[in-house]
């Protein structure tokens, strides 16, 4: 029994409407009626076409490319719901943009992830629901509750079904030192070993593999990361694992497939046999890669939304 008695309503912007529709299908709800358009000068216009007074509103919007357009669209939608007297507003962000700018890497750098957190809070959001933040400490940038779900249970199920009895010949590899913690957790759940690719990043979106820590010879390798942007790092790591480490086959997976710039061409040309993503970001429509596949995360977000609405714990989703 819902103690607060509020109606649940789910809306979406233009970033990934297909994902929002899948979430609604799992919840047995219809998607709320709204319009997000642009004026002739490029300013974003939001129209909420149904009442939300007192409702528990969930706004599904990934801040994926075009990042700034999708972010501002989310902020304006939240403001519209706040001014329409929504009871509670949850920003459901399957992919949280600007998450890599979480600290000062050099003098006079901004901490853009903190700024985005402030904007979302000031716009009127009461809580945030997201998945696999690039840096977990971003949760502390908010002054409102943040639920950061993990995508690895979805990959876990996929690879157990894929390799079955061949798991003894499988090893999980972290593509860089910064991803070791998440790769180790995934390897432990899968019950396999862990190796690490040691790379040096010379500049943004450019890196060089220096060493492979661990034995990957004659192994089926699963490269595990939180996101793939230009794919330079993960493709370079995959090629090194085969050419230097002697891996038998390389598979790769990441929660968020940003796939900007030359990413799809690099994946096509690499030795990666299969690249799996969750559908937190829509696939770019201008290019095609038969190596790329997607696993739906809609049912996990649907269950999380239901638990937030019911005001019960979402911690079972982390196991």
Image: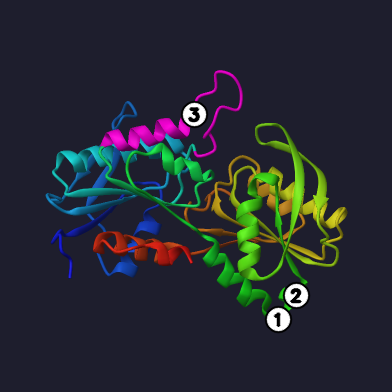
Q: CA distance from mark 3 to mark 1?
A: 46 Å
Q: Does 6 sit left or right of 221 as displayed?
A: left
Mark 2 neighbour density, 10 Å: few (under 14) some (14–19) many (20 or more): few
**Location of residue 293 with respect to 71 vertically, above or below:** below
Per the image, label 2 sits on a secondary structure element best described as helix
Per the image, label 3 sits on a secondary structure element best described as loop
Residue 111 image label = 3
Residue under circle 1? 165
Residue 22, horizontal then vertical, whole percent: 37, 64
Q: Residue at x 39, y 36 (%)?
A: 117
Q: As drawn, which residue projects farthest toward the top?
A: 108
Start-end of magenta stretch: 99-123
Residue 262 image label = none
Q: Residue at x 52, y 66 (%)?
A: 154
Q: CA distance from mark 1 to mark 2?
A: 7 Å
Q: Are marks 3 and 2 in contact (CB under 8 Å)?
A: no
Q: For the image shown, how many numbered marks are present on the structure?
A: 3
Q: Residue at x 26, y 61 (%)?
A: 311
Report whether residue 289 is seen: no
Q: Does 103 lie within the magenta span?
A: yes
Q: Does 200 sit left or right of 279 as displayed?
A: right
Mark 3 neighbour density, 10 Å: few (under 14) some (14–19) many (20 or more): some
Report whether residue 140 is seen: yes
Q: Are marks 3 and 1 in contact (CB under 8 Å)?
A: no
Per the image, label 1 sits on a secondary structure element best described as helix
**Location of residue 99 with respect to 304 vertically, above or below:** above
Q: Does 36 lie within the magenta span?
A: no
Mark 1 neighbour density, 10 Å: few (under 14) some (14–19) many (20 or more): few
Q: Are marks 1 and 2 in contact (CB under 8 Å)?
A: yes
Residue 103, horizontal then vertical, whole percent: 54, 31
Residue under circle 2? 168
Of residue 183 and residue 130, the one placed in the foreground of this image is 183
């Amino acid at each position: 029994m819902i103690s607060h008695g509020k109606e649940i309503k789910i809306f979406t912007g233009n970033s990934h409407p297909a994902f929002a529709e899948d979430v609604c299908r799992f919840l047995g709800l219809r998607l709320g009626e709204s319009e997000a358009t642009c004026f002739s000068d490029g300013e974003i216009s939001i129209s909420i076409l149904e009442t939300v007074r007192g409702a528990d509103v969930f706004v599904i919007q990934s801040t994926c490319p075009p990042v700034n357009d999708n972010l501002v669209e989310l902020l304006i939608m939240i403001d519209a719901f706040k001014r329409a007297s929504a009871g509670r507003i949850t920003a459901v962000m399957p992919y949280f943009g600007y998450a890599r700018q979480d600290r000062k890497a050099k003098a006079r750098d901004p901490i853009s992830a903190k700024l985005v957190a402030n904007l979302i809070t000031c716009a009127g959001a009461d809580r945030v629901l997201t998945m696999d933040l690039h840096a977990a400490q971003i949760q502390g940038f908010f002054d409102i509750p943040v639920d950061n779900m993990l995508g690895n249970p979805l990959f876990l199920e996929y690879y157990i079904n894929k390799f079955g009895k061949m798991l003894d010949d499988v090893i999980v590899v972290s593509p860089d030192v910064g991803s070791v913690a998440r790769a180790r957790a995934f390897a432990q759940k899968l019950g396999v070993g862990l190796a690490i690719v040691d790379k040096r990043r010379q500049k943004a979106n450019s890196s060089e593999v220096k060493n492979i820590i661990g034995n990957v010879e004659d192994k089926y390798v699963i490269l595990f990361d939180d996101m793939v942007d230009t794919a330079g790092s993960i493709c370079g790591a995959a090629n090194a694992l085969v050419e230097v480490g002697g891996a038998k086959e390389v598979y790769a997976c990441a929660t968020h497939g940003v796939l900007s710039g030359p990413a799809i061409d690099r994946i096509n040309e690499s030795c990666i046999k299969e690249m799996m993503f969750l559908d937190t970001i829509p696939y770019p429509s201008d290019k095609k890669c038969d190596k790329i596949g997607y696993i739906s995360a809609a049912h996990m977000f649907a269950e999380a939304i239901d638990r937030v609405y019911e005001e019960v714990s979402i911690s079972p989703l982390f196991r």
